[in-house]
Image: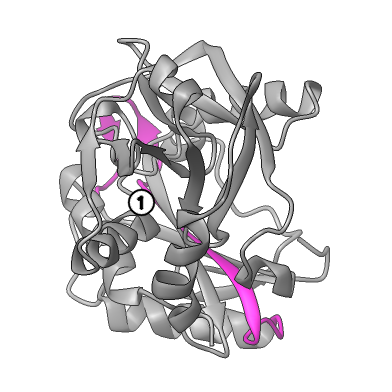
Amino acid sequence: MLLNAFVNYNGMVYRSVKLLISPESRSFRYGDGFFETMKMINGKIPLADLHFERLFSSLELLKFEKPDYFTPEYLLEQIDEIAKKNQHTKLAKVRLMVFRGDGGLFDPENLTPNFLVETSELDPESNKLNKKGLVVDVYKDARKSCDNFSVVKSNNYLPQVMGALWARENKLNDAVLINNSNRIAESTIANIFIVDDGIIKTPALTEGCVGGVMRKHLLQVIREEGIPVQETKIKVDDLMNASEVFLTNAVSNIRWVKKVGESNYESQLASVLYKKAVAPLVK
């Protein structure tokens, strides 16, 4: 983010360089909160309904006390204001962070959601299917838990952070994370899909992956098109033996993977799904 950029903190606009978070913040201390990553195209948020469905589901799951004013309409107004202030309405990444108030582990001052909205300009290439396939590998030094909270984009992001550092050290585009059963969960920043004998497969939500918005949208389109698809358990060997692998998130849409470890992949279904599921969103 540029030093002269603006952020929206609880409905007020500040310079991004201004210190905003208290040292007693439960988010800073404990990772107590979650975030939503969205894309803005010409002032609009593609799949906004799915984003806010996930946001308010996370709000309830994490036992926040939602004020009456805290609605999708209110949050969209805050996003729109800061995007315009930063001149990011044409094509931008929007990060909306929600977190608890100050306090110790057993004594938060309140359970009302605080929020922070940031925007950053995106490269137009983010709207296209990547020409060059990604090179990734499986990261085994951290495990994604499989519980009621693993679907949330939590502010406690340590496995993803360490996986991303490992990927950078090894000159990879991303790292694949596994769960406590040594099965595939997701990548550090995306959900993962494989193609196995003509069937599209993705880890079930019970496997520790985040409940991705693009994942949900893509599954809907795949089923509408009558393409065989399964939300299931995927072993590392299944990933290595797949004919195709691709990653999905709301910002990069679909990105096909060329290589995982020593395994190489093609890009056929990813191209088809981009045209059917993504192209209509980025016009």
Q: Amino acid at mark 1?
A: Gly
Specify whether residue 89 is painted magenta: yes
The residue labelled by disc 1 is 212
**Image height of 170 relative to 216, above or below:** above
**Image height of 255 relative to 238, above or below:** below
Q: Residue furthest front?
A: 197
Residue nearer the viewer, 215 or 155: 215
Specify whether residue 262 is painted magenta: no
**What residue appears at the point 45 percent right and 39 percent down from the top-left corner?**
155
Q: Is residue 222 left or right of residue 252?
A: left
What is the quadrant of residue 3 in the picture? bottom right
What is the quadrant of residue 118 in the picture? bottom right
**What residue appears at the point 39 percent right and 24 percent down from the top-left corner?**
184
Query: Percent position (x, y) of residue 206?
Result: 20, 30
The boundaries of the magenta stretch are 86-111
**Image height of 41 relative to 36, above or below:** below
Instruction: Locate the C terminus and report the quarter of the image it occupies.
Output: bottom right
**What residue appears at the point 25 percent right and 57 percent down from the top-left corner?**
227
What is the quadrant of residue 281 in the picture? bottom left
Q: Is residue 145 left or right of residue 53?
A: right
Residue nearer the viewer, 71 or 177: 177
Query: Percent position (x, y) of residue 245?
Result: 50, 40
